[in-house]
């Protein structure tokens, strides 16, 4: 079994943007210089705006904020020690 890790940040949908709300001080996101308040623009080269539009088109019964958060969390998970691009805007 492969141990799953995360990049050490949490984000929430604010308006139409996925905004970083917390960064673990000793996590990979902090080491990369990501700070609370920054906007997650893309994960693994997949634009968050496109994902949000798709979620809003197809999901009527659940909160778009929860669905986007869940999808973003899934894209930011991976084996411990793995890496992938996350584009953020300060």
Image (cartoon, rainbow, N blue to C red):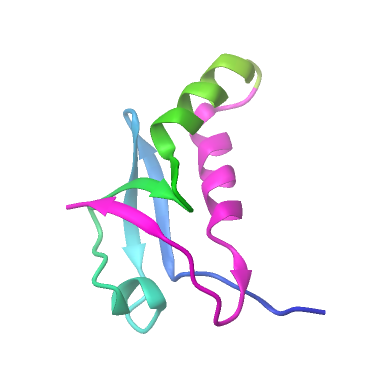
| Residue drawn 17% across the image and 52% down it | 90
Does 6 sit above or below residue 85? below
Quadrant housing residue 57? top right
Residue 70, image x and y in percent? 58, 45
Q: Is residue 89 left or right of residue 82?
A: left
Count up the numbered dots.
0
Q: Residue furthest front?
A: 45
Q: Range of the magenta residues?
A: 62-90
Q: Residue furthest right?
A: 1
Quadrant housing residue 28? bottom left
Residue 85 falls within the magenta-colored stretch:
yes
| Residue drawn 42% across the image and 39% down it | 47
- Judge by depth and name the residue closer to the eye, 5 or 84: 84
Residue 4 falls within the magenta-colored stretch:
no
Does 89 sit above or below residue 13? below
Does 37 sit above or below residue 81? above
Look at the image and tell me in which quarter the N terminus lies.
Answer: bottom right
Residue 8, image x and y in percent? 44, 71
| Residue drawn 54% across the image and 23% down it | 54
Residue 36, image x and y in percent? 25, 59
- Judge by depth and name the residue closer to the eye, 27 or 47: 47
Does 79 sit above or below residue 51? below
Residue 38, image x and y in percent? 24, 52
């Amino acid at each position: 079994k492969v141990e799953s890790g995360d990049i050490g940040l949490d984000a929430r949908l604010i308006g139409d943007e996925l905004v970083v709300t917390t960064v673990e001080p000793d996590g990979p996101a902090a080491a990369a210089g990501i700070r609370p308040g920054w906007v997650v623009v893309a994960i693994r080269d997949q634009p968050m705006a496109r994902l949000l539009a798709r979620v809003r088109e197809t999901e009527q019964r659940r909160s778009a904020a929860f669905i986007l958060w869940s999808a973003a969390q899934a894209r930011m998970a991976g084996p411990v020690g793995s890496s992938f691009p996350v584009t953020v805007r300060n």
